[in-house]
């Protein structure tokens, strides 16, 4: 199976791409500087730059960025080389979102607003 990032960034090594977190999809686009995963449900985008800093188009030290999903700002929530730090932030963000949600059942036991199993 060909992933979206492989079409948008054919030179990106598949072994360097981390596993897709729950609730995210591959949102890589060829005009972006690197592959990304996005979640409309959680309002986040995770940018996944090349392992080799020499291949990065943007002059940054860290490989991963977590930003708002297409809100027009340039906010960065997390900037790190540690994938586990990205996952920890995403988990914390989801927990906060779910804690403040009114939980509307989708009919399949999942909240349509925050993705929590109810």
Image (cartoon, rainbow, N blue to C red):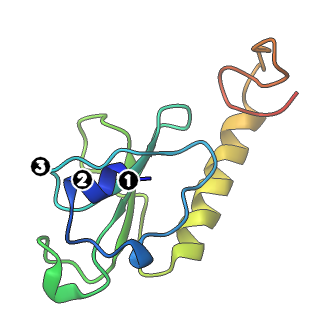
Nearer the observer, disc 2 or disc 3? Answer: 2
Q: In terms of secondary structure, where does tag 3 sit? A: loop
Question: Looking at the rendered structure, which numbered label has been put on residue 2?
Answer: 1
For residue 117, which quarter of the picture?
top right
Quick one: label 2, few (<14), some, or many (20+) residues within 10 Å? few
Please give left or right for residue 1 compared with residue 55 in the image: right
Q: How far across and down, in percent of the image, does residue 22 sit? A: 64, 48
Q: How far across and down, in percent of the image, does residue 31 sit? A: 11, 49
Write down the residue under mark 3: 31
Write down the residue under mark 2: 7
How far apart are labels 3 and 1 at the CA level?
19 Å
Q: Are marks 1 and 2 in contact (CB under 8 Å)?
A: yes
Please give left or right for residue 65 compared with residue 12 in the image: right
Q: How far across and down, in percent of the image, does residue 79 sit? A: 38, 70
Q: In terms of secondary structure, where does tag 2 sit? A: helix
How far apart are labels 1 and 2 at the CA level?
7 Å
Nearer the observer, disc 3 or disc 1? Answer: 1
Vertical arrangement, residue 51 with respect to residue 31, above or below: below
Q: In terms of secondary structure, where does tag 1 sit? A: loop
Residue 117 in view of the camera:
yes
Residue 80 in view of the camera:
no
Quick one: label 1, few (<14), some, or many (20+) residues within 10 Å? few
Q: Are marks 3 and 1 in contact (CB under 8 Å)?
A: no
Sequence-wise first label, 1 or 2: 1
């Amino acid at each position: 199976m060909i992933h979206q990032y492989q079409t948008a960034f054919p030179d990106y090594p598949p072994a360097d791409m981390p596993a897709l977190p729950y609730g995210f999809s591959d949102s890589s686009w060829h005009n972006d500087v690197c592959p990304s995963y996005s979640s409309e449900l959680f309002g986040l985008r995770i940018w996944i730059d090349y392992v080799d800093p020499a291949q990065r188009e943007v002059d940054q030290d860290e490989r991963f960025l977590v930003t708002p999903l297409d809100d027009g700002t340039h906010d960065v929530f997390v900037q790190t080389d540690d994938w586990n730090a990205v996952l920890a932030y995403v988990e914390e963000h989801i927990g906060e979102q779910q804690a403040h949600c009114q939980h509307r059942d989708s009919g399949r036991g999942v909240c349509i607003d925050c993705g929590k199993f109810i």
